[in-house]
Amino acid sequence: MAQIQAIKGFADLFPAQSALFLRMEAAARAVFPRYAYGELRTPLMEPTELFQRSIGTETDVVRKEMYSFADAKGRSMTLRPEATAGVMRAYIEHGVAARETVSKFFTIGPMFRHERPQKGRMRQFHQINCECLGPREPEADAELICMLMEFLDTLGLTGLTLHINSLGCPVCRPAYRTLLRTWLASLAPDALCEDCRRRAETNPLRVLDCKVPDCKDNTAAAPHILDHQCPECSAHFAAVTRLLRARKIPFDIDHRLVRGLDYYTRTTFEVVSGDIGAQGSVAGGGRYDGLVSSLGGPDVAGLGFACGMERLALLMREQDIPTPRPDFYLAVLDDSCRDTAFSLAQDLRLAGLAGILGFDPRSVKSALRQADKSRARFALLLGPDELAGGTVMLKNMENGEQCAMPRADAAARLAALSSPAAQGPAAATSGEHA
Ligand code: HAM
């Protein structure tokens, strides 16, 4: 019978991968609440109109990437391609603005976009997403970016570049859009790719974002949006960048950073890595002051970002960020020891240690090979001699030291040896050990 396979672009996350996801989620849950963010869980499916009205009907996401279908009553439903729209819907629907002037939410979960799968690009992917509603002040933008950089730092990631730009506001952007449209119209007819020839009319800012090399080259001299902003937008951007400099957060001003979703105003940013191939953007976001009101809510400002978890996982692997290891591998060297070993493994787990019970009566050598493969910090060996003497053999897999010890002491000894303090300062801050 033919095998059933997963849908293209939809992945199974086995423990080696989900351990990285758990680590990201733990970092998010440790960092974001210190900035007063609370977790919000919204549905995976929403009415299609929500995404059309928020992300914009001219964007790639809405034009060609949404998983939309009619439900039993013929209503169009969509698997969420991003989290922001659902958070806005929930915020408006539950009248949150009437209860608090500032609301901060984070969400973690799967998103769905029908894109061409490749390294770092999936059709079901996961985001860690933050949204802050209420503040108009530039401190909110700078705080959000500081929080994102702290989160990435907590994961131990390096070599990331923060790109930042401002897209202006409804006061100044229309004039820039007209200026850019006129500038693009002055180019030779074949200077732009087919998509950009359409965008030049419908959404000219997106032309700046095109990845086709010829489009990039031919628009290198396009006017910069930062040079055509109203005094309020200019002052806002100057304040955000000043605050980032004061906190020693390095950034590159990127005049071409326009983002692929239509709701942005003023500050936009992306964090990019050169270590994971063409899909190097690991996080992106910005301010969206008109979004809540355009969805029928009050006139509340907003800003946020999302990190792509698959891309962060690629980077964590690339940069050898460690994942949790078992504390022990307890090898049963003879059938006569099985019951005692089973009980000892349970005692160790109840003492808070993580480990594996392995049956390997062939030889000490093969037991140690299994212990090594499991990445356990310690191998425990239990054979007839230890059984008779009330002991167990302990081998430190990192430095090779070994000794026999009373089984009754094993839990306390291993717990002491596995504590972050016993492993040195690097381990104490790595968050590697539960
Ligand atoms: P976005 O730039 O479309 O923004 O996505 C954010 C991040 O999600 C990207 O930087 C990337 O890491 C990841 N990502 C996007 N598409 C894929 C894919 N097909 N496969 C793997 N990873 C992907 C947003 O989604 C906005 N909602 C962010 C935001 C929140 N802006 C304000 N608040």
Image: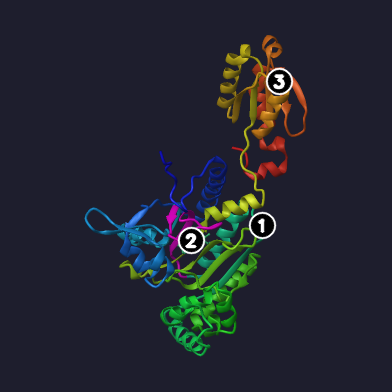
Q: Nearer the viewer, residue 5 or 401?
A: 5
Q: Earlier in the sequence, mark 3 or mark 1?
A: 1
Q: Amino acid at mark 1?
A: Thr
Q: Earlier in the sequence, mark 1 or mark 2?
A: 2
Name the image quarter holding residue 74: bottom left
- Up-down relation of residue 279 to residue 212 (above or below): above
Q: Is residue 265 within the magenta segment?
A: no
Q: Are marks 3 and 2 in contact (CB under 8 Å)?
A: no
Q: Which residues are magenta?
A: 110-136
Question: Separation of disc 3 and disc 1 at Cα?
Answer: 43 Å
Q: Which mark is residue 70?
A: none
Q: Is residue 378 left or right of residue 270?
A: right
Q: Amino acid at mark 2?
A: Arg
Q: Is mark 1 within 8 Å of ligand 1?
A: no
The residue under label 1 is 158
The residue under label 2 is 116
Question: Residue at 70% of width from left, 14% of height from top?
Answer: 386
Question: Residue at 57% of width from left, 19% of height from top?
Answer: 342
Q: Earlier in the sequence, mark 3 or mark 2?
A: 2
Q: Are marks 1 and 2 in contact (CB under 8 Å)?
A: no
Question: Residue at 44% of width from left, 52% of height from top?
Answer: 110
Q: Nearer the viewer, mark 1 or mark 2?
A: 2
Q: How many marks?
A: 3
Residue 287 x/y as whole percent: 47, 69
